[in-house]
Image (tube, helix red, strand yellow):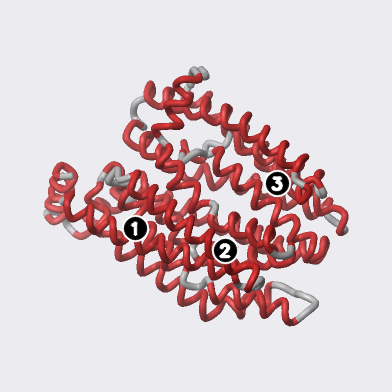
Amino acid sequence: MQMDRANAQFQTIVAQSMSPQQRTKFYLRKYRSILGNGTSLFSLKTIDLGLSLWLIPFLIAKIGMYNYGVYAFAMALTWFFVNILNYGFNLSTVREIATNKHHPESLQTIFNEVLSVKLFLFIVLLSVYFVLTYSVPQFSDHKTLYICCSFILFGDLFSLRWFFMGIEKMKFIAWIHFFGTAIFVTLVLINIQSENDFDRVPLYQAIGMSFTSFISFVWVVRKYKFKIQLFSMSRILKYLKDNFSAFISLLLPSTYGTSLVFLVGAFGLPTMAGFTQIGVKVAGAFSTLTNILTNVYFPVFNRVKSTMDRTRKFLILVGFYASVLMFLFGGFLIEYWLHFEKASEIQNVQLIVQLMSPVPFLMAVISSYGVNGLLVLFQDKIFGRITIISSFIMLLFAILCVPIFPVFGGALAFLIGRMVYAGLSFYFFNVGHGTTN
């Protein structure tokens, strides 16, 4: 920490001795990586949100709201499995790569370690997924849909998002995601024409993911001359144990939305699951800039911790304005974006969106004091406990509220969970940070 501050002070002194033009060039070089990664991730999110949000009304028109809810319910379960497959790599591994990105031998070790863990988890998760598909009536009634969803796990097996985040090359993520999404959307537009086609939608998404992930995987192996070597079972189990806190810290918040959609579908009707998924996507759209800044800053903060304080206010301000915009204009956008047969359906979605409007601000607080606060200070266990507590509270309120308030019960539980998450992150960061300094 003291070395970071000394380095920052030295750079400030150097910048003050320059002319205005030299100072501009100095800061442009200094923040080129952040600006480039931010721009790339913004492009990624814009493409992803633009295509996926545009696809929702198309799918509803072709397969109907009920089938869309069944599809949303199945995808919620699938994405939960995908997040387990990623086992916190976007936090723990990104942090490790960020500090070793100029050491080829360390990078190869990290790469093989993650690949070994991922392959092991893939085999276990795929087995569990098929057991659920064939044994649980709610899943086996739509067996084809869930089998198609299972291919998404294979598509994510070769995903190297964690690697590109660690080496701070976000533009590669942007291009990979763009081509994957483009393939998915093209296949949907060509092949989804009636209600009976709804079970093939996740298959087309899996095709897009698999193609782009595998191509990028081969490119990285050749570019960095990695020699693939799978690790022993004992080392895999040790990795799973050592990184459990980071896994929980990433799994539960990453699956807040999908878990919520799943619970609404389990305790309510498929149509309500569809409404809730739309609300979660809108909240995610308004949280886009916060998510981008979180991903861009995380590897930087792990190298230069002194920059945390200067960006915290900006992050929170971005989240605050995003929440205000979501509250004021979210309902208006819903009315002109989605076309339902019943006016009550539009009103239900508008109610969910307005209820979730504080979420972007809460996400900014969690980013500032949790992901880019506690985790950067290696307080993984504390952040893991915070994540577990807030997730348990969300789960509890979902079980209680969804049967009573089928329309907005899930959104209310989601909001309460995020409030607890943000509040505890703020409190424990300030307590721990005070002692650290």
User: Which of the two residues, 46 or 97, is positioned nearer the viewer here?
Assistant: 97
Q: Residue at x 55, y 31 (%)?
A: 118
Counting the numbered discs, the total is 3
Front residue of this view, candidates 181 and 72: 72
Amino acid type of the residue that numbered disc 3 sits on in the rendered structure: Gln
* Residue closest to the eye, 436 or 2: 436
Q: Secondary structure at mark 3?
A: helix
Q: Is residue 273 above or below residue 224?
A: below
Judged by depth in the image, the label closer to the viewer, 3 or 2, is: 2
Amino acid at pointer 2: Ala
Q: Nearer the viewer, mark 2 or mark 1?
A: 2
Residue 425, disc: 1
Q: Which residue is mark 2?
A: 398
- Residue 270 versus residue 200 in the image, above or below: below
- For marks 1 and 3, the one nearer the N-term is 3
Q: Disc 3 to disc 2, how far (Cα)?
A: 29 Å
